[in-house]
Image (tube, rainbow, N blue to C red):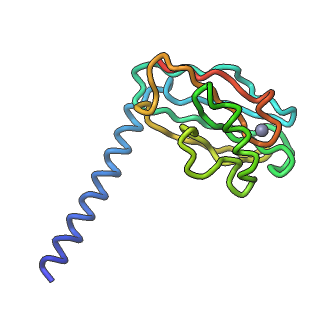
Amino acid sequence: MKLMRNTLAAAALLGAQALLFSMHADAAAADQCKLEITGNDMMQYDKKELDVPADCTQVTVTLHHSGKLPKQAMGHNWVLVNASDLTAVANAGMSAGLESDYVPSGDKRVLAHTKVIGGGEKTAVTFPTSILKKGGSYMYLCTFPGHNALMRGAFKFG
Ligand code: ZN
């Protein structure tokens, strides 16, 4: 019984530490590490490029949808890939379908992604920059079928 109590206490302590750590990490992240991008009903993002300073340890990308159309008709997501994987990921995403947010599950070529949202919604993704190489060539895209031709941009780290 004593052992179980100790185990529970240790688990609670670990949980508290994890919470404190994540709060601390959030507080330490400069505003520059938090990016905003908006998609609209015209199948466009409002930015052609996103830049992340080299000293960001993590990045949060918030995607807004300023349109009115539902996600079944004009859904948008934000998917980060190596530039050379863009077309392959777009094609694989199309097959994955809306229920999978047009992102193939477990696909290592997908570095980070949000879910698909419709008009008036927003969503965000946070990921560590340890998955990126400084000066690497990255791109983001919307993997809703047909959107990546217009909805893509350069993602620069460092
Ligand atoms: Zn889209």
Hey, which residue is sitting farthest left in the picture? 2
Q: Is residue 155 left or right of residue 136?
A: right
Where is ligand 1, by quadrant?
top right
Is the N terminus in the top left, top right, bottom left or bottom right quadrant? bottom left
Task: Residue at 44% x, 23% y: name it.
Answer: 133
Q: Is residue 145 left or right of residue 104?
A: right
Quarter occupied by residue 66: top right
Numbered label tally: 0
Task: Residue at 37% x, 45% y: name it.
Answer: 22
Q: Is residue 60 left or right of residue 123?
A: left
Quarter occupied by residue 89: top right
Image x and y of residue 44, in percent = 80, 29
Q: Is residue 20 above or below residue 10?
A: above
Image x and y of residue 127, in percent = 48, 38
Q: Nearer the viewer, residue 116 or 111?
A: 111
Q: Nearer the viewer, residue 137 or 10?
A: 137
Image x and y of residue 65, in percent = 75, 39
Task: Residue at 64% x, 30% y: name it.
Answer: 140
Q: Is residue 84 above or below residue 93?
A: above
Task: Residue at 76% x, 46% y: name it.
Answer: 94
Image x and y of residue 108, in percent = 53, 42
Q: Nearer the viewer, residue 68 or 141?
A: 141
